[in-house]
């Protein structure tokens, strides 16, 4: 079945089914390309800038340098 044959049926789908189709195609394409996707059961660390004192010092030094230059 070609895409042109599928389009009318896709347009008749309900919104939730269209979103599910998009998700299915996304996962299939990612798997074909070997791109790892996020897993629902996994935990992923998120970096927070809290207590990033070295970064704050670096930023302060850059700001002071920029202010000192004419």
Image (spheres, rainbow, N blue to C red):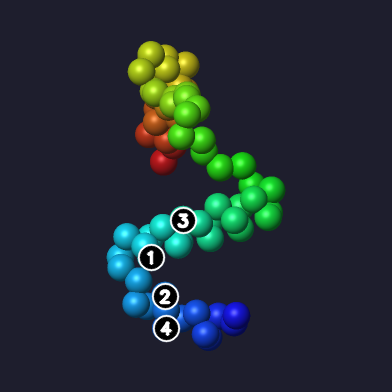
Q: Which corner quadrant holds the C terminus?
A: top left
Give the quarter of the image for residue 48. Answer: top left
Of circles 3 and 4, which is in front?
4
Q: Residue 8 bears which disc, if any?
A: 4
Residue for badge 3: 23
Identify the residue shown where x is 45% and y is 62%.
21
Q: Which residue is drawn at 42% across and 75% down?
A: 10
Mark 2 residue crowding within 10 angstroms, few (<14) / some (14–19) / many (20+): few
- Viewer-proximal residue among 32 and 64: 32
Is residue 48 in sight in this rendering?
Answer: yes
Q: The N terminus appears in which quarter of the rendering? A: bottom right
From where the camera sits, is residue 68 visible? Answer: no
Of badges 2 and 3, nearer the viewer stands 2
Q: Mark 2 points at which residue?
A: 10
User: Around disc 1, counting alpha carbons within 10 Å, would you say few (fewer than 14), some (14 to 19), or many (20 or more)?
Assistant: some
Regarding mark 2 in the picture, which secondary structure is present there?
helix
20 sits left or right of 16 in the view = right
Q: Is residue 31 above or below residue 52?
A: below
Chain-order first, disc 2 or disc 1 = 2
Give yes or no for contact between labels 2 and 4 (Cβ–Cβ under 8 Å).
yes
User: SS class of the residue under badge 3?
Assistant: helix
Q: Where is residue 30 in the image (x, y as percent from the top left)?
A: 61, 52
Provide the secondary structure element on which disc 1 rests.
Answer: helix
| Residue 39: % across, % down | 51, 35
Question: How far apart are labels 3 and 4 at the CA level?
Answer: 19 Å
Of the residues under marks 4 and 1, which one precedes in the sequence? 4
- Do the CB atoms of the residues marked 2 and 3 lie less than 8 Å apart? no
Q: Which is nearer the N-term, disc 2 or disc 3?
A: 2
- Alpha-carbon distance for marks 3 and 1? 9 Å
The residue to which callout 1 is attached is: 18
């Amino acid at each position: 079945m070609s895409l042109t044959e599928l389009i009318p049926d896709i347009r008749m789908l309900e919104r939730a089914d269209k979103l599910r189709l998009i998700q299915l195609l996304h996962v299939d394409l990612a798997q074909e390309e070997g791109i790892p996707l996020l897993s629902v059961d996994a935990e992923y660390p998120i970096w927070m800038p809290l207590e990033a004192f070295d970064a704050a010092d670096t930023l302060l030094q850059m700001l002071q340098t920029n202010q000192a230059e004419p």
